[in-house]
Image (spheres, rainbow, N blue to C red):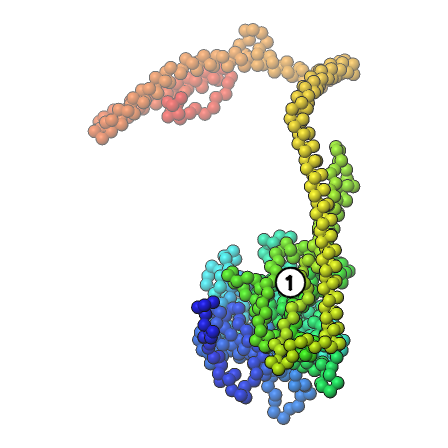
Amino acid sequence: MKLVPQVVDCKSIQIGQYNHASNSAAPIAKVEWHPWGEGGTTLLVMTTDGKLREYDISVDTEEPQQVLSFVPEKRMNSFIAEDASEREVASFTLGKGHADWGPLSVYALMRSGDIYAICPYMPKNASIPSSYIHALECFVHAKQEFLSHSVINASTSLSNLYDYQHKYVSALLKQLPSGTAFPASSQFFVLHPPTTIKGSPIRQGPFLLQPSPKLLDGSEGGDATDLVYLTFGTPSADEEDEGKTERLGVVLITYRDGKVDVCLDVEKVEAKWEHRQHKNNDLPMLAVYETIDLGVISMLKKVTSTPSGPSILDLVDGNHPVFLRDPIQEETVYVYHAFGVHALQLGGLLQTLAAALRDDSSNAGDDDLTSAVEKSGGTTVLPILTTFSVERKCSNPVIGVAIPNDVYLTYSIFILTSAMRVVCFPLTLRSELDSANEPALLAVSQTKDDFAKSLSQSVSTPLDGPPAYVSLLTEPFELPAVLARQNGLPSNPILALPPAPQDAKSELQLTPDTLRYLGTTFERFMNQIREVQLAYKAAQRRAELQRQEFKRQQETCKEMLELIDRLHTSRQATTRAKVADTQEAQKDLLRKEERILRLLTKTASPELSEHETKWFQELKRLQEEVIGAGRYDADSLEARTALLRRDLNRLLPNLRELHEKEERLKKKLAEFHQSLGVSQAFEFGERSNAERSKISRLETDIQRLAERLDMSLGRPPALHETYKS
């Protein structure tokens, strides 16, 4: 801290001085970095006149690379019955998705609450993962295949639209290097918007909000101020599956009166271009799931307005709620406005909807899907900071909120008010296990149902042997709601008031409003104290029950160890003796069974049957043929085999002698191969022919002998095989 000066120099770069620095320039509605800009240098600037300008600060900080228009230009001598708020942009956001046109979509919010979208849009110098391009190609190809095999005659405009989408994706694929297709790992590559399609992307909208969002009590509806697009992965039984499951898109819209509409993007926008064949009057739709009240109107109504002054509700006109995504926990969104900061936790809602969609995809009925959606809890709203002073009947708006996403900084939130006061406090980092244990989530109820089902099955189907062990812990422990809050205790928002004027009195001015505020706050604290005490008693009872269960398990484990020891020692010897006795008894039974079987067979058929007689006669004939009718039967196979063996033994010495001679000749031939002349080779050839003739005559004699013995011989072996044998 000693090395940091009082004034910190901040390096800055002025962007678009010509378009934004003049007095006549349209005010800036929102500024956001594009996540797919090359090097992270693509800055998107939206002005209230509907112009979205893309600046690449590494290339040119003055001239935009691309300009998108969400508000059409008015034609000369034309009159359109529309309010000024319908032509003023309040905010914009980028779409998201996994294998669709979501990441190439831009949504704009008008001050009137209308939402428009332009798709496709990508930065001039974009860094896009190759896996997304290939997934988008599969998505477009699947829609073309479905259209070609559809029973209903497809319109020409729809077919032409899919052709244009295919050309666009094909142009992106051509920019990818070879070898990036699956199963290659995904990498980021620099791509540029295709120029093959001459038409510009068309503005789609306004979106239909179905059903119509509700109005807050005491409010006639305020101007829209901000929107944000969130995506959440649906739960899957196999997280390793890419199989990464389809992602659920959620659009949040906030208004000045503190209303937040939660919409589901059930029909995502697709790429469309300005073309006379692509005319389609169907408007996109967002399904309104719930309407959240941040309590701004109800808070102001509790304060009594000054009789001579303006109404306290006029403070709503200066309210401008803005969304901030949590960079670590994607299910949490913060809304900061003129009266404080609220945290919106959509974890329970989204897991319920994701589980309902998963059940619906597994051929579940519409009634099951409807009941699951009706049972799902809404968004959890947590006020974490309030800047409204009941005593002074004013508030200092929150102008900035930051959540560091850095390994060197604690997971905390920094809040800056218009009075230049910074409020900082740490946040609770929840793991996936903690998120799964929230009572509002459907995963817990499913775990309970599975646990009860398995318990009932184990009880209803008893097995042979000792009774099953029944635990005292019949249900998993649920953390009490008062202790499961992300921001901890107390749940009352932190009060950040503006500094008192110098001439004002330091004493607290007691008014009916301040007394009412103090009484309400005191009541909340007392309720929380009682809830904490009840939670403490519940935790104590659970801890005592777990100690009893642990003691029972120790005793049961000791009994099991003693039983195992007995089974290894005395019971094992006894069992082996019983097994040996059983084996001996089994052998006696088998012998008795064999004797009884013989007696029964002899009693049932004392004489041989015709087939048995023929079988024994055939066996006798075969015995005489093999052994012979008498001791000196020369025609038996045994006698003929003995004669053949003697002749073979008589011929084997000559064959061995011939083999040895052949080996000696081979050795001599190998020794004198180089010095061998023509005459010597001729002499060796004559001797070899003579030996071959002797062998042929010997083979002929053996064949004649076999014919006299009435035996069949196989084909004579080759000469080199005879020598080896």
List the residue tagged with mark 1.
Answer: 487
Q: Residue at x 48, y 21 (%)?
A: 713
Farthest-out residue, bottom: 77
| In the rendered image, the vertical position of residue 254 relative to residue 707, given as above or below | below
Say which quarter of the image contains residue 488.
bottom right
Q: Residue at x 43, y 24 (%)?
A: 716
Q: Position of residue 662 (x, y in %)?
A: 32, 22
Q: Residue at x 67, y 15 (%)?
A: 616
153 or 340: nearer the viewer:
340
104 or 398: nearer the viewer:
398
Say which quarter of the image contains residue 398.
bottom right
Q: Residue at x 56, y 85 (%)?
A: 26
At mark 1, the secondary structure is loop
Neighbor class of circle 1 (other Cα within 10 Å; few <14, some 14-19, many 20+) is: some
Q: Position of residue 393 (x, y in %)?
A: 69, 79
Q: Amino acid at mark 1?
A: Asn
From the viewer's perspective, tell me whether residue 150 is left or right of residue 40: right
The tally of labels here is 1
83 or 130: nearer the viewer:
83
Q: Is residue 608 visible?
A: no
Q: Position of residue 493 (x, y in %)?
A: 66, 68
